[in-house]
Image (tube, rainbow, N blue to C red):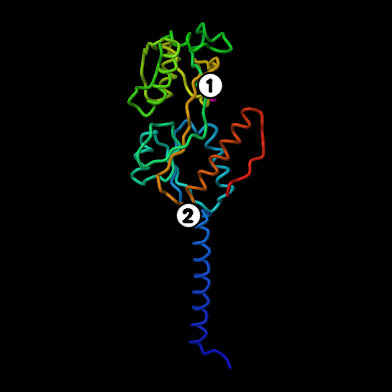
Amino acid sequence: MKLTEAGAAFLREARGVLERAEHAALAAQKAARGDSGHLSVGFVGSVAFHFFPALLRAFRRQYPDVELHLEELRSPDQVEALLQEKLQVGLLRSMKDVSGLCQESVLAEELVAVLPEGHPLASRARVELADLAREPVVLPPRHSGCGTLHDLVVQACALHGITPRIAQQATELHARIALVAGGLGVTMVPATYQVLQREGVVFRPLTDPAPRVDLTVAWRQGDRSPLVRAFLDVARETAALHEARRSGNVVSISPKY
């Protein structure tokens, strides 16, 4: 006995259907585990210097079949995109509680002083916040996406009984540093930005306790996507390893999945 031509054609198609069905079942299982699929992530530019590259490397190593869609956005724009379901996860500077969103701080970064070259305070290894606050200060506008930094600096100065004299305002960090280089004042930025090493300015750490700004991961309340959970786990793991390295206590951290 042997198959007819029609039977052989049917067998080929039947085998193809079974293979596609098996592939579809495996793909569904991988997606359910968070091992594959698409994930849209927003991020603020300041994380691009150290934490975010490490996070991306760790995530891609553990989830090579997940396609990441990345978009650089200011913190308020990320909040809007999350609420409109244009993003699934955001990495932003800490915001006030937003209805419909969950936020979790993953890193706290110290602020450092940015001074013009040749400034009298630039000769010090560390700068007193009280001394810095008496200088003309360059800050982002309070209503901008960097409003959290504005408020943090003002509040830190208030602890020393000083109201900072805001000489200039600029939304973009590169513009603020350029104004400092031009001698129009001093400013404070997250320590990450020291890698910029722009001509005309110097970075100096502040004396303890230096003000700290949080890096926060945000997602929609009730979002049970396994990809979102996987990203949160890797972000926590990467942040813990980053802190351990920064403190000199490098440890082995096991994934929580």
Q: Is residue 130 above or below residue 214?
A: above
**Front-most of 115 and 100?**
100
| Residue 175 as seen in the image, left or right of residue 250 | left
* Image quadrant where residue 101 sits: top left
Q: Residues within 10 Å of mark 1 (few under 14, many from 20)?
A: few
Residue at the top extreme?
120
| Residue 252 as seen in the image, left or right of residue 19 | right
* Residue range of the region highlighted in magenta in the rendering: 194-198
Q: Is residue 137 above or below residue 245?
A: above
**Residue 100 is one of the magenta-drawn residues:** no
Q: Residue 54: x percent and y percent?
A: 57, 38
Q: Residue 37: x percent and y percent?
A: 48, 54
**Which labelled disc corresponds to residue 197?**
1
Going from the N terminus, do you reach mark 2 or mark 1 first?
2
Q: Residue at x 40, y 31 (%)?
A: 95
Q: Residue 80: x percent and y percent?
A: 34, 39
Secondary structure type for disc 1: loop
Secondary structure type for disc 2: strand
Q: Residue at x 53, y 64 (%)?
A: 26
Residue type of the residue flagged with mark 2:
Gly
Residue at the bottom extreme?
1
Q: Residue 151: x percent and y percent?
A: 39, 22
Q: Residue at x 52, y 23 (%)?
A: 110
- Secondary structure of the magenta portion, mostly? helix
Residue type of the residue flagged with mark 1:
Gln
**Which labelled disc corresponds to residue 37?**
2
The quarter of the image holding the N terminus is: bottom right
